[in-house]
Image: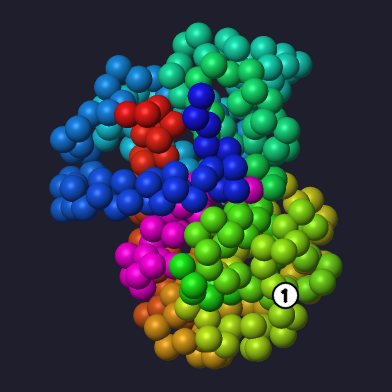
Amino acid sequence: MTHFLDIHTTSPGDLRGIIDNAAAMKSARAGLPKGTKDADQPLANQMVALIFEKPSTRTRISFDVGVRQMGGETMVLSGKDMQLGHGETIADTARVLSRYVDLIMIRTFEEQTLLEMAEYASVPVINGLTDRTHPCQIMADILTFEEHNGPIKGKKVVWSGDGNNVFASFAHAAKQFDFDLVFTGPETLQPEAALDGLYTTVRNPDEAVQGADLVVTDTWVSMHDPQSARERRHNQLRGYQVNKDLMDKAKPDALFMHCLPAHRDDEATSEVMDGPNSVIWDEAENRLHAQKAVMRYCLGT
Ligand code: CP
Ligand code: NVA
């Protein structure tokens, strides 16, 4: 069974294969209308369940479109509508779903839910974001970086802001793809200890971005964070906003990324988001291509 649960639990060789395959599939359909089926139909006759226990725009639509382009069918399910939220165990849900579908993608809260789904499912399971990680996002980010600025190996990536789930997958990727990752953010929002050794911390953002090839940020309040923490987080993170002053201290050709959804003029200014170094729309598009390659990897097609 080949699940795609996290970047650090997938080998560097497999990760590279997924990126290369994504790039090839993207170029094979360049310029075609979005609804055009791929020439190969590797998901023909395959049924894919897309389960969301949290809101989503990009993950939901890019997975759905990707499956259709590859000839498969999807079922988009909200956690609320399933028995999942009403007492049926994850293990039982996984066993039942495995009798109906060929592949499961789940976005959930606790990582344990994802891991239990994978343990008891007899079909592959893909992580569509948990409170701890977001590996599909980072596969799209690597694809995007390499399209614009070549191999990411040896490059300097700077994360400014909250040490959250998206950062965690960047930290895993830093090891697997061999790039340098710097975290700049308040001590109170330092990434979890399990990530120690995968990145370095430079508390001052102006110092941190010097020589950066890529500057990344994300929302200051994630879906799993209590809304009551909003004001406190904003106060702690204000100094880590990605604005033109900060981008000007990185390399002139440094890229700017944000997984989106963004809160314009909080974690990043519109000037940066819409500026010449920003690749956020390519990044969003590449969710589609990267995840198509992830699904093929899981299904061995
Ligand atoms: N970046 C991302 O995962 O977006 P959605 O929450 O809209 O899926
Ligand atoms: N860190 C954000 C990412 C959203 C795609 C969250 O978990 O809400």
- Please identify the quarter of the rendering in which residue 176 is found: bottom right
User: Closest to the observer: 78 or 101?
Assistant: 101
Instruction: Tell me the magenta residue range.
Output: 133-152
Determine if the magenta segment contains residue 148.
Answer: yes
Residue 80 screen position, x and y as percent: 64, 26
- Seen at 47% across and 87% down, the residue is 251
Residue 158 screen position, x and y as percent: 59, 74
Residue 269 screen position, x and y as percent: 54, 77
> Badge 1 local density, few (<14 within 10 Å), some, or many (20+)?
some
Residue labelled with disc 1? 201
Is 41 placed above or below 88 here? below
| Whether residue 268 is visible | no
Q: How many marks?
A: 1
- Seen at 45% across and 80% down, the residue is 254
User: Closest to the observer: 126 or 220?
Assistant: 126
Is 264 placed above or below 29 here? below
- Please identify the quarter of the rendering in which residue 169 is found: bottom right
Q: Amino acid at mark 1?
A: Thr
User: Closest to the observer: 267 or 145?
Assistant: 145
- Seen at 16% across and 53% down, the residue is 31
Image-based side of 49 in relation to 208, left or right: left
Determine if the magenta segment contains residue 168.
Answer: no
| Whether residue 224 is visible | yes
